[in-house]
Image (tube, helix red, strand yellow):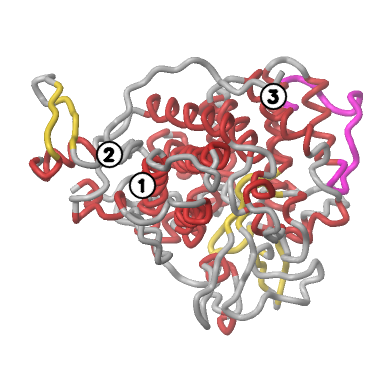
Amino acid sequence: MIMKRFFTIRFIVLLAITGGLSACSDFFDVAPNNGVDTEKYYNNTNDINGGAFGIYSALAPEVHKLFLWGSARADMVIAGEGEDAYVSEFLNNKVTALNPYTDYGFLYKAIARCNHHLNAISRVKPSDIVTPSALEVFYGEAYFVRAWCYFQLVRTFKSFPLITEELAETAIYVNLAGETVSMKTLDLTDEQLRMIALKPADKQEVWKVIISDLNKALRLLKDEWYLTYYPGFSMGPVQKIIRASLLSTYTLACEVAVWNKQYREASEFADYVLNYKPSPGAAETWSSHFLGTGDAGSYTLWAFMYYYSGAFETTRMQEFTSSMESYGGRYLVQPNVEVLDAIFSEEGDVRRRSSWMRIDRKNVIWKYIGKDEAGKSMRDPYRSDAPFHLLKVADAFLFKGIAENRLGNAGAALQMLNAVRGNRGLQKYEQSQIPLDMISLENMLFTERARESAFEGQRWYDLLLQEEVLGRKNVIAETVSKKYPKDQQVAMYNHLKNPENWYLPVEPERWK
């Protein structure tokens, strides 16, 4: 039976303020920027759906930050020929508190909109037009997105606030004397508001909220919900993957469970995905899902797409990765070919020719600018429509493999590894060919993760997971220091051995 709960949890929810702090507007921006009057809508599912879209609109334009946080700091990305001092800080793992790319305000915009959405839905009276089942789906969608946002925060930053509810008229908080106080919001001082809303969170409490939200989303979301609530509506492959689904929630729950050493639960969460998607996708069509021509839903369970509002507009990923200035490229980053050659060392891997390319004597990350596997066709100038993949079917296979390996089930772990390898053009391993001890098999699973999610904001977190959760010593230092010039490697190794350098600092003004 698929488990829908990690474990029983009890926690105190921190109170959130959704207005009143002018210096912290990023935290409390609930306006969806789509012309919807939030005081008048929520009368039918179309209105509620419009509110849901506002949640995602805060996230999609900021994928370059996810890339910097999760890929630029790791070993597969190095500096291009363009110059940006703040991008260089990520590439050099010397990120300062004033770096604008550490601004996590976009995550809190989405969180605030989730909180507002949940509060607004609670006021809707079910009817023939807005059925209870429809309301459940929209609740589940908001819980999923909020869990995902906090999952990014808890793995990336040293400190950050926990905001889980929208405050209307009354605030209840514990004062310095330990007394529980109830006051009208308008009567609170700015300092009291900051104390309630921007108090740094205990990370264990954040993990509890993530798990609680995912438990709720698993209960509330439904398979193919858009077919039920929007009959006759043409939902293409892109539309399917830019909204939360039950499959994406199970996949995220699987990964979160591994981060919390809940290996049996992680394996069972993955089973739900594998029952629907028994294959991680065929080798012959893999590249089409990243070069813009395929049904991405066969491979991807959740992705961000950029929506254009005018001419000469580029995604930040096109800007960062393209070497062609006339296309909007600044060539700030490039693939680390020496490291990639070692990771993609086997012949026949279909991911190699789609992930990076050599164009006009320059190595470029091809996923966000290319349209074919031959390096002959690029996306239009100032218009890269490449999706930024967040959760994929292969994630369920590989995290199930990691979980089974930690449970001592080497055979099941190898089966998951081979399922991905065999569908990417690589030969499946025979048990007699490879060592099956836990560490060796785990290394192979994470190497497969590196191939599958190259340049997609995952690599740093996979290294952090090995070091901080799985108990693998010096993985970050040993792996990442190799990308630097030889005369810098010892210093970078020592720098990256320090856990204080694994998390990004927070710009001080965000707390004022």
Between 300 and 42, which is closer to the camera in this rendering? 42
In the displayed structure, does residue 363 sit left or right of residue 169?
Answer: right
Q: Earlier in the sequence, mark 1 or mark 2?
A: 2
The dot on residue 267 is 3
Q: Kindly identify the residue that appears in the image at 75 percent across and 27 percent down.
A: 441
Dominant secondary structure, magenta:
loop
Q: Tag on residue 112?
A: 1
Q: Position of residue 336 (x, y in %)?
A: 63, 57
Q: Residues within 10 Å of mark 3 (few under 14, many from 20)?
A: many
- The residue labelled by disc 2 is 16
Q: CA distance from mark 1 to mark 3?
A: 32 Å
In this view, 347 is above or below 420? below
Please state if 177 lies on the left or on the right of 157 as rendered: left
Which portion, as a residue range, is magenta?
Answer: 422-441
State which mark lies toward you, 2 or 3.
2
State the SS at label 3.
helix
